[in-house]
Image (cartoon, helix red, strand yellow):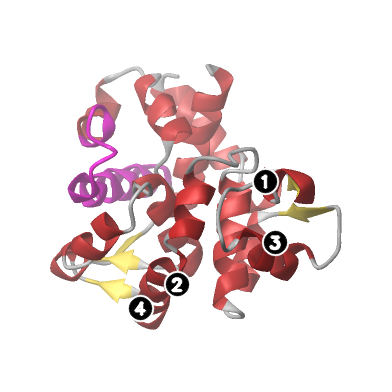
Amino acid sequence: MNYNEFAVISNYFSPVLDQGPVLIKADTMARIPSVQTERLCDLFFQGRDYVLVTRNDIFRARRGNIELFILSVLFWGFPRNQKGRCTAAMNNWEALVEWTRSVRNHKEMTTDEFTNLFPIMDAIRGIGISTFSKLLYFLGAYIDGFSCVILDDMVARGVSNLEGQEFEQIRTAVLGRYRYYRYYTDYLTAIDNLSIDNHIPEGNVEYALWLAGKKNR
């Protein structure tokens, strides 16, 4: 994707308006190997066979039951991953709930305050910046004034498909580094610059990168 293509896509498509709902199947999630699975699936599905979840649904959920919010983020972000991040999350559930609650209560952080969360994040084994960035994004968190947006495999793949010097900053911030928490703020800075240059919300930048990654999957 060159810069002109990126500018058109990021201006035209909105993650909230244009991304379709994610179908989450109860029978798939019920197979997650965790002592928390039955209780949390009962909480989320409430007897339904499936649930459709959109970004807007998750934004609304952040103000309510914190466990439902986290489940919405996890199941939306990893709808078919029953043995990966969802398993790790459920096996570290209490710690993840406390981390999420602390961010929800203090959404505007400095880089130092974000760095202070690293030991807690490290202790929640099996979960990386892909999951944490989704939680930060849907909580509406900021780090040094930069809006938190999602950084996952698909976005990183999209960054690898960017062409041109205009993307040097975000390539440096992401490629080979994105799994490490300490580089997340570099990514947010690069996202902010692309957002300002194109006069679009930061979420649109992330969505354009996600689309670029999905196209070349």
Observer-side mark, 1 or 4, equals 1
Residue linked to disc 2: 97
Q: Are marks 2 and 3 in contact (CB under 8 Å)?
A: no
- Amino acid type, label 1: Arg
Residue linked to disc 1: 31
Q: Are marks 3 and 1 in contact (CB under 8 Å)?
A: no
* Percent x, y of residue 214: 56, 25
Whole-number angstrom distance, CA of label 1 to CA of label 2: 21 Å
Observer-side mark, 2 or 4, equals 2
Image disc number at residue 41: 3
Q: Residue at x 51, y 34 (%)?
A: 210
Q: Residue at x 29, y 39 (%)?
A: 179
Which one is earlier in the sequence, the residue at label 2 or at label 3?
3
Residue linked to disc 4: 102
Residue 57 drawn in magenta: no
Q: Is residue 194 left or right of residue 32?
A: left
Which one is earlier in the sequence, the residue at label 2 or at label 4?
2
Whole-number angstrom distance, CA of label 2 to CA of label 3: 16 Å
* Percent x, y of residue 67: 57, 72
